Image: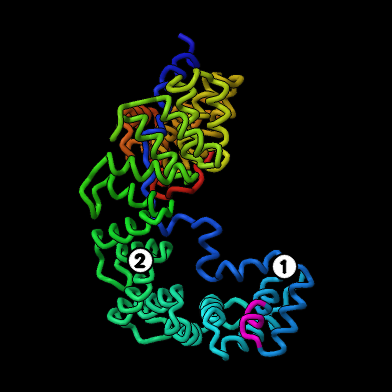
């Protein structure tokens, strides 16, 4: 029987159905949309200076010279950030921010707190950061209240004090700021500056979600899905994912599609699953692109198309998503949706295997053992099989045991050194 035919029959089982996995990130891993990042430091009035022309900036300069604190603050931001066509000038920018802050302008005080904390345009100084954040916090600036709480929790620039941290967190939370509520949820989740509490964490996520914040809706959806800090409820998870998804939150779109795919909290519906997964895929989410590839490959919720499956797997694989890389390797080996190419199959299996994907490690072992797409190498084949077996891939145990029978003692020791030295992300030698 033809060896390549046998090998492809073995590898065909290794397509990984990636659309079944749900996102379970913490909010700290999710970047807030741009408008919410702005909210952390600038009011909507100050954000208008981004588009300011020279006439507006000249107005700021005139008013700032006359001692107007708001104009001094705006002018400081213009120079620090190089806005409105003005070249960036850190010294001048900080000088104007300082003038405004010394007049008691709270937003300037908060801005200086952030800049000293990060060392932006000024020497990094936790002590100065805490001083300016305190001045702004005492005037009710919610972001500075929250930052000061974090500084007390970690003992940065102030004596460590969980009591003071919690006091400032509560002051910030009392202002019903939806971004701060999510961040407070993160702190309770991690137990940073506050006692660790999944229940408190979920409560703050839900408070923010009820204000319509899509990141919080996604987070509380995850909590209801897993039952962490709240009673487990697929129906409530679905509700929150849908609210976030309808606002364009790509992680929620993917999770919503996955729940439709698996029939969690809703009747199973492949068509709806494909609609939502495709929305996330079109926004560039690698997991969704890979999941959509699988839907096209299997014809679930979309017309079956090997070519579209390859196209979506490729988008995900080029972002480094290992599941898609492994699946691409399988399709190149089989010549399904692409011209058959053993070398490309090896290249994609190798990328996925080096990230620790067990089916890819197993398939790469088969390629090394058979000499398809690269020179035959039983030492590396054994190492790949062994790594796949360690990761729980059932067929790999028999494979490495059988391969061991063909190795000399020297080769076996060499393979064992490869296995001992390998870590996820490290290359697998040819």
Residue 382 visible to the viewer: no
Q: Main secondary structure of the magenta part?
A: helix
The answer to which of marks 1 and 2 sits earlier in the sequence is: 1
Q: Which residue is mark 1?
A: 52
Tell me where residue 204 appears, x and y as whole percent.
Answer: 32, 61
Q: Secondary structure at mark 1?
A: loop
Q: Is residue 236 above or below residue 39?
A: above
What's the residue at 76%, 68% (across, down)? 53
Relative image position of residue 35 (x, y in whole percent) = 54, 59
Tag shown at residue 160: none
Task: Tell me, yes or no, whether the highlighted magenta stretch contains residue 71.
Answer: yes
Residue at x 72%, y 88% (from the top left corner)? 65
Residue 150 included in the magenta stretch of the image: no
Residue occupied by mark 2: 184
For label 1, the crowd category at 10 Å Cα-Cα, with few meaning under 14, some 14 to 19 and many 20 or more, is some
For the N terminus, which image quadrant?
A: top left
């Amino acid at each position: 029987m033809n060896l390549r035919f046998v090998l492809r029959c073995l590898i065909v089982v290794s397509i990984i159905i990636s659309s079944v996995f749900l996102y379970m990130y913490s909010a700290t891993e999710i970047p807030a949309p741009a408008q919410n990042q702005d909210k952390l430091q600038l009011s909507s009035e100050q954000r208008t200076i981004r588009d300011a022309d020279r006439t507006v900036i000249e107005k700021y300069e005139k008013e700032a010279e006359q001692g107007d604190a708001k104009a001094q603050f705006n002018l400081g931001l213009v120079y620090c950030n190089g806005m409105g066509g003005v070249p960036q000038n850190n010294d001048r920018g900080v000088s104007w921010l300082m003038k405004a802050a010394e007049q008691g302008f709270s937003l300037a005080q908060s801005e200086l707190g952030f800049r000293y904390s990060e060392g932006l345009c000024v020497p990094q100084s936790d002590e100065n950061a805490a001083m300016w954040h305190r001045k702004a916090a005492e005037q009710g600036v919610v972001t500075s209240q929250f930052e000061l709480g974090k500084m007390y929790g970690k003992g940065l620039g102030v004596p460590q004090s969980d009591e003071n941290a919690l006091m400032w967190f509560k002051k910030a939370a009392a202002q019903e700021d939806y971004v701060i509520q999510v961040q407070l949820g993160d702190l309770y989740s991690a137990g940073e500056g506050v006692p660790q509490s999944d229940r408190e964490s979920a409560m703050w996520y839900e408070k923010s979600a009820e204000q319509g914040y899509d990141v919080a809706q996604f987070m509380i959806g995850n909590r209801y899905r897993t039952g962490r800090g709240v009673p487990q409820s697929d129906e409530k998870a679905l509700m929150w994912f849908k609210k976030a998804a309808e606002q364009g939150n790509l992680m929620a779109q993917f999770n919503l599609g996955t729940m439709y795919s698996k029939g969690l909290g809703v009747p199973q519906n492949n068509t709806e699953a494909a609609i939502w997964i495709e929305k996330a895929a079109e926004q560039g989410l690698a997991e969704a692109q890979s999941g959509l590839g699988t839907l096209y490959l299997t014809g679930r919720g979309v017309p079956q198309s090997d070519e579209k499956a390859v196209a979506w797997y490729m988008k995900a694989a080029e972002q480094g998503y290992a599941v898609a890389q492994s699946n691409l390797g399988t399709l190149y080996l089989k010549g399904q949706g692409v011209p058959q190419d053993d070398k490309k199959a090896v290249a994609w299996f190798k990328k996925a295997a080096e990230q620790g994907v067990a089916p890819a490690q197993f398939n790469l072992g088969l390629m090394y053992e058979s000499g398809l797409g690269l020179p035959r190498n039983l030492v590396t084949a054994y190492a790949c099989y062994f790594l796949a077996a360690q990761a729980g891939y059932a067929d790999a145990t028999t494979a490495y045991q059988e391969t061991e029978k063909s190795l000399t003692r020297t080769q076996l020791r060499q393979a064992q050194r490869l296995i001992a030295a390998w870590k996820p992300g490290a290359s697998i030698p040819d």
